[in-house]
Image (spheres, rainbow, N blue to C red):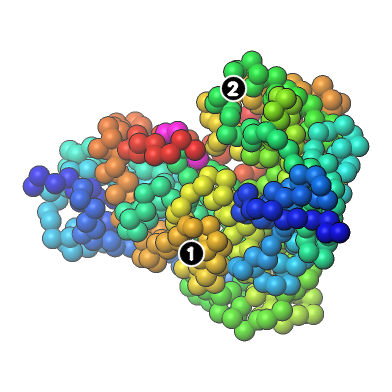
Amino acid sequence: MSLLHALGIESTAHTFACSIVSEDGKILVNEHVRFTPEKGKGIHPREAANFFVENASKVVETAIRKSGISLDDISLIAFAQGPGLGPCLRVGATIARTLALSLNVPIVGVHHGIAHIEIGKLLTGMHDPLTVIVSGGHTCIVAHNAGRYRIYGETLDITLGNLFDVFIRELGLSKKIPACKMGSIVEELAKKGKTIVEELPYTVKGNDVSYSGLLTRAIEVAKGGKYPIEDICFSLQEIAFSMLCEVTERALTQLRKREVLLTGGVCANKRLQEMMRDMVSIHDAEVAVVPPEYSADNAAMIAWTGILAYKAGIKMSIKDTFIRPRWRLDEVDTPWISDISGS
Amino acid sequence: MKLIHLGSVISVGAEAVIYKGYFIDREAIIKKRVKKEYRNPTLDERIRTLRTRREATLLVRARSLGVPVPLLYYLDLSDYTIVMEYVDGEILRDIVDEISVQELSKLSEQLGKFIGLLHENRIIHGDLTTSNVMLRDDRSLCLIDFGLGNVTYDVEEYATEIHLFKRALKASHPDKFNVIFENFIKGYQSTYPKASIVLERASTIELRGRYIEKDRRRK
């Protein structure tokens, strides 16, 4: 086979995933399992890692079988090197190293956040977007400038995913579903709310947002019982998303971009999508939302970014593949992108 | 007599629509905080009122401290409108790569002095980036866009301002980061006696952020 095929492994948080992608951008297979904590609990890193260990080989085997290609056709192993939960990252990294050594193919460690952006660009056809990554791990506004992705706005404390997850769990409203789906409980309740709860703070600092004060206050107000939970969820969404739209609009006008790419688990929220579309409408820009299968954590994005990096000459030896739980997105060189604008 | 002539739109920003027109017979900038379609109406009104009021207040306060800002001509809260002096010049962000390193150092130090002066007087700008600093045609600075500013006694707020400025520089001017930031800090320390406390807090804010590598954390 002449085309490069990469096998990607994702294991940064609650999802263990394996995917095979070819160099022409075709996703042959995209398999995953998600760790579901007990009702009312968050992701315990060690429990998630144990769950990964138990399920990993099954996921990898299924992916290879469904892909229709054989192990010998795999020319590259890519894995999520960070950021994420240490014990979880370690499972994926170990499997990736084993595969690379046994198949005798190169290995590339990929930044999870950058992978979100690259798969989004592949699937939506955007070239130089302002990307809004909203998930349990990230809430940031990113654009490419001078050889790297740069962060133009982000949360100063917790992420949007955290905000919804912790709020729902603190109030005992959670169901036995993966942590990454808690936002959907807020979204459902918010549909029945109408009134903005005045006590909730709106905190924008420059191009950044801060959600920790909003979370604390929302929990207090909800426990106080003065307002229906529907109104609190409604207000929580309206305020949190308005803050994000505001800083996104700020970055959009400063950088004069024409494309907004929305990705990460929380971008599945319909209200957020609607608000972002309303926001860009006066700026001659467009919004694209990455489809749920590829905006939530997945391995296709890892495999694809691995291909981009490898083809741009990034080589790693096994000793370079230590996991990086706190790897910042703006520390990664991106030789596969030529600078489009000088902004 | 009509006080305000709107003139023409010169920019549609995130925060407001900016017109270049006239206040009586003077050239003026008219800044209107327009309704945001994406935002809930109650929330929208709350935010627009607060920011219009704050911006007008801070323009006057800053000016009284000797920090160069556009002169406030008029305020109409009912229409979320501020009318101010038209500043002839360029946005610093657009010319960072055109001016000499010597001039950039000098301007950065001056900017630091002004921000130090504001902090010394309990004022934060709230959105300090090179997009909100103008260079007048006579090569002097002018600070604009105080809509996110505040009067505060909280050292955390001053430190956040420094932290965000630093990050904005790294994103927008990675090649000029050192020269701008070092000189900025030099100026900041010269007008603000408590600068070291703020700078120390700023580095803890940076470490509190997401995904800062561990070895940097331990320092």
Examine the rendered structure and indicate whether residue A191 appears above or below residue B52.
below
Asked if residue B32 can be seen in this view, the reply is yes
Label 1 marks a residue whose chain is A
Q: Amino acid at mark 1?
A: Cys
Q: Secondary structure at mark 2?
A: loop
Q: Quadrant of residue B4?
A: bottom right
Left or right of B18 in this view: A226:
right
Kindly give the residue lying farthest to the left in the view shown: A1
Label 2 marks a residue whose chain is B
Q: Are marks 1 and 2 in contact (CB under 8 Å)?
A: no
From the top left corner, tell me how far across and down residue A284 is, in percent. 49, 58
Q: Nearer the viewer, residue A14 or B20?
A: B20
Disc 1 with disc 2 on a shared chain:
no
Q: Secondary structure at mark 1?
A: helix
What residue does disc 2 label?
B99
Left or right of B128 in this view: A150:
left
Identified at 80% across, 44% down, the residue is B26
Examine the rendered structure and indicate whether residue B51 appears above or below residue A267.
above
From the top left corner, tell me how far across and down residue A216 is, in percent. 73, 62
Asked if residue B56 can be seen in this view, the reply is no
Q: Which residues are magenta?
A: A146-150
Q: CA distance from mark 1 to mark 2?
A: 41 Å
Identified at 85% across, 48% down, the residue is B73
Q: Nearer the viewer, residue B92 or A28?
A: B92
Question: Is A149 in the magenta?
Answer: yes
Q: Amino acid at mark 2?
A: Ile
What residue does disc 1 label?
A267
From the top left corner, tell me how far across and down residue A61 is, in percent. 21, 59
